[in-house]
Image (tube, grey):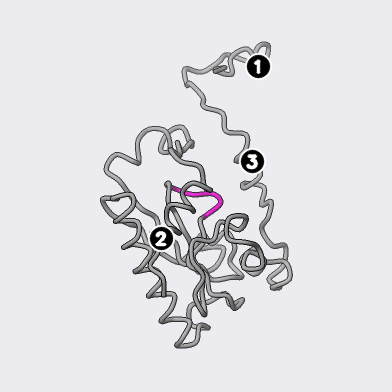
């Protein structure tokens, strides 16, 4: 692993920081795959349901919503519960959609507890870009499993997350454990 010092030759004095380079993250930072408009035509959460489950990383399909792994997870197993309908705000969900998003969130937590034994969860919806929504035009509920010590120096200092499992393997494991309706 290069510490970046040889790249600094002639540019100044190197600092004492070690660096873990994660150049693949630049695609996310630059917004690749994020819709350029609020139209459903340009929305990845509207496109994903037309894919097969493995390709789209879909863990479960319901009547009004689906559960999908986050392509840029905070932790292994980080999934999103998305309504099929293209709505931006929680208050725009109808009663059936609200019930299914809530029920699917509860089921996701139960499945993850069975399969990966997390110590806790972060649940949340970021409403609007200013609130942190990466794709603000299509509502999605985050379900993030957490383990003691998972916020070590790598993400806090190094801005790098170690993922112990491939997304496809995580999807297969959670989908197999998801109760059949």
The kind of secondary structure element at disc 1 is: helix
Which one is in front in this view, the residue at disc 1 or the one at disc 3? 3
CA gap, disc 1 and disc 2: 39 Å
Note whether 134 is above or below 107 in the view shown: above
Dot 3 crowding, Cα within 10 Å, few <14, some 14–19, many 20+: few
Q: Which tag, 1 or 2, sits closer to the chain's start? A: 1
Residue in the image at 49% along x and 66% along y: 60
The kind of secondary structure element at disc 2 is: strand
Which one is in front in this view, the residue at disc 1 or the one at disc 2? 2
Q: Which residue, given by chain and number where applicable, does mark 2 sit on?
A: 143
Q: Which residue, given by chain and number where applicable, does mark 1 sit on?
A: 7
Note whether 141 is above or below 151 in the view shown: below
Which one is in front in this view, the residue at disc 3 or the one at disc 2? 2
CA gap, disc 3 and disc 2: 24 Å
Residue 181 in the image, given as x and y percentages of width and height = 41, 75
Residue in the image at 63% along x and 12% along y: 6
Residue in the image at 48% along x and 21% along y: 18
Dot 1 crowding, Cα within 10 Å, few <14, some 14–19, many 20+: few
Range shown magenta: 70-74
Residue 66 in the image, given as x and y percentages of width and height = 51, 69
* Mark identifier at residue 26: 3
Please report contact status of discs 3 and 2: CB closer than 8 Å, yes or no: no
Q: Which tag, 3 or 2, sits closer to the chain's start? A: 3
User: In this orientation, which residue lies closer to the viewer: 159 or 175?
Assistant: 175
Q: Quadrant of residue 124?
A: bottom left
Residue 87 in the image, given as x and y percentages of width and height = 58, 77
CA gap, disc 1 and disc 3: 19 Å
Q: Which tag, 1 or 3, sits closer to the chain's start? A: 1
* Mark identifier at residue 156: none
């Amino acid at each position: 692993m290069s510490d970046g010092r040889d790249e600094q030759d002639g540019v100044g004095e190197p600092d004492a920081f070690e660096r873990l380079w994660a150049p693949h993250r630049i695609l996310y930072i630059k917004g690749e795959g994020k819709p350029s408009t609020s139209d459903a035509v340009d929305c990845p959460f509207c496109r994903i349901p037309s894919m097969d489950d493995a390709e789209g990383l879909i863990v479960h399909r319901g009547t009004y919503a689906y559960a999908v792994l986050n392509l840029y997870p905070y932790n292994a197993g980080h999934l999103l519960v998305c309504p099929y309908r293209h709505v931006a705000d929680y208050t725009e969900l109808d009663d059936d959609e609200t019930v299914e998003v809530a029920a699917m969130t509860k089921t996701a937590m139960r499945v993850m507890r069975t399969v990966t034994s997390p110590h806790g969860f972060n649940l949340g919806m970021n409403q609007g870009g200013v609130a942190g929504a990466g794709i603000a035009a299509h509502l999605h509920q985050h379900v993030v499993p957490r383990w003691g010590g998972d916020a070590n120096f790598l993400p806090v200092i190094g801005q790098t997350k170690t993922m112990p499992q491939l997304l496809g393997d995580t999807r297969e494991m959670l989908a197999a454990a998801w109760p059949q309706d």
